[in-house]
Amino acid sequence: MVQVEPLEEGEQPQLATRTEGNTNEAFHPNLYQMAPERVPALHLNLPFILDDLKTETSQKQLSTARSIMKSVDQPFLPPLDKATHVEFLLSPLDEGLSGGFVGLDASRPWLLYWCINALSLLGKDVGIYNDRAVSSLKPLQHPSGGFGGGNGQAPHVAAAYASILTLAITSYYASIGLPEDERLAVYADSFAWIDRGKLLQWLRKIKLPNGGFKVNEGGEEDVRAGYCALVVLALLGYDDEDLRGDLSRGELPLLDGVAEYFKSCQTWEGGIGAKPNAEAHGGYAFCVLAALCLLGDPEEALSKTLDLNRLISWLSARQYAPEGGFSGRTNKLVDGCYSTWVGGCWSLVEAAANAIESGKKSTKMNVGDLWSRKALIRYILTCCQGPRGGLRDKPGIRPDYYHSNYVLLGLSAAQHYYYYDDVSVQSPVLTKSPFRHGYRWKSSKNVPKPTGHDGTGGGWLEGLVSEESDRVGVQHPLFNIPLGAEGQLQSWWEWFNDVGDVDALSSEN
Ligand code: FPP
Ligand code: ZN
């Protein structure tokens, strides 16, 4: 059996310091030296056929391909400029946002989540933002349940999702190394004020009889809503009874028909659309795959519900050559944020296909790596770093907080291998949780090589990160928060559901 090389408990990426004005050090050894043999050959040349018809899209595509070709001639890849990206991401938190951001007033929890998660990926301790996250998010809780995107705004499931993720991250960092009672006190400050009963009632209002969810009352139906709802339910410690509801009062069980609904969103291309009969798109594909993996082990949950062969074929078509980045849909351009939406799908599909690490007896072989991690890493490092900090869609486009988070998260997906662990002992509460499968994910720094049908061969593909200073943090492949934060939060709910005496906890922390 292949042995997994796990990350150390609580292991954090290195936080690089800036080398002021030392332009000679813009490229570093080892990584790119390895690239020509590691990046598949089709990523080393411009496309062989270029259409004579010039459109805005074809011009942009060619210009991105040319940007990547410039790096092919260089001996080394640019390093990840962590210090400058940290500065870019700290600015809205420490100095505030300019008036130009007024249009994002309904996205307050998103801005917090993007910046805080991206900073954690870069190795920053974001625990210092816990109190401010709480005081910013508390007013967004709606009196009738759920979270709005801005003060006084109607509840929206994406706002609830981003709020809970933010609190899960900041409380995790704020409680690292604290004794048990102080750790519980941090979580009490961060979570005990959430009205879980009303939130549940509100989620029932956006649940649809077809199995899906709407994003808000009167809002649109899509798989994003289903994924956000399931993540919120999974991270807020609800049990089966809560989700079932009271049938005598006409309440719909919240998980009824969810998997069938997701199944009906797989399209003729093999990808997954926003809702039945919609165009396949990477953003929605991630939502469906991650939500399904909250409901079961990846091998079963994905293969039982989806046509995996067609999904893999469509996912493969998302990685373009020579760029190495992913597009979100057919005939559209690569964009750094799909490093998460599509790269995140690959993490889950690979975990399903390479099931040896899970300890499952039924699976004796690994298929290895199904996409080019090296080509994505090259796209991110050469094309997605803004020169003055922040990460972006592609060259020529300004960095922003959304892309900073999802480009770095995608870099993390390329640098780490995720697997589902069926064998480790679980706490009794976790074993009973309707979302217990979501709490069994682990990561490794290396990717398994393919094994033979009899389980022979294999071993590990190493060297995904040859400069440790380029490594970013490890994230939970379903929740998109630091791996480990989900378990700490769940153990708080375990205590809260059992004891619940928040007033007895010290808040001197
Ligand atoms: C297309 O934009 C973008 C979409 C259709 C939405 C994609 C969905 C997500 C990114 C998932 C969101 C997930 C959560 C959890 C809220 P476009 O036409 O500008 O981009 P394109 O040309 O790349 O398709
Ligand atoms: Zn994008």
Image (cartoon, helix red, strand yellow):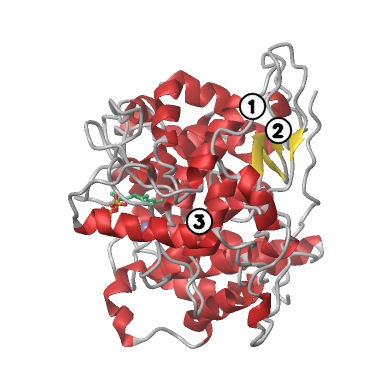
Residue 379 shows which numbered tag?
3
Residue 392, position in %: x, y?
Answer: 43, 66
The kind of secondary structure element at disc 2 is: strand
Q: Which residue is mark 2?
A: 448
Q: Which residue is mark 1?
A: 354
Tell whether label 2 touches label 3 (CB within 8 Å). no
Q: Is residue 15 left or right of residue 251?
A: right
Residue 176, position in %: x, y?
Answer: 75, 64
Look at label 3 and name its amino acid.
Answer: Tyr
Instruction: Give the quadrant of residue 360.
Output: top right
The kind of secondary structure element at disc 1 is: loop
Look at label 2 and name its amino acid.
Answer: Pro
Q: How many other residues sit within 10 Å of disc 2, few (<14), some (14-19) or many (≥20)?
A: many
Query: Foreground residue, 202 or 483?
Result: 483
Q: Nearer the viewer, mark 3 or mark 2?
A: 3
Q: Nearer the viewer, mark 2 or mark 1?
A: 2
Query: Foreground residue, 277 or 490?
Result: 277
**Which residue: 47% across, 73% down?**
386
Residue 61 in the image: above or below residue 309: below
**Which residue: 36% across, 69% down?**
397
**Tag 3 or tag 1, which sits nearer the N-term?**
1
Tell whether label 1 touches label 2 (CB within 8 Å). yes
Query: Foreground residue, 165 or 365?
Result: 365
**Which residue: 29% across, 40% down?**
330
Q: Is residue 1 left or right of residue 90?
A: right
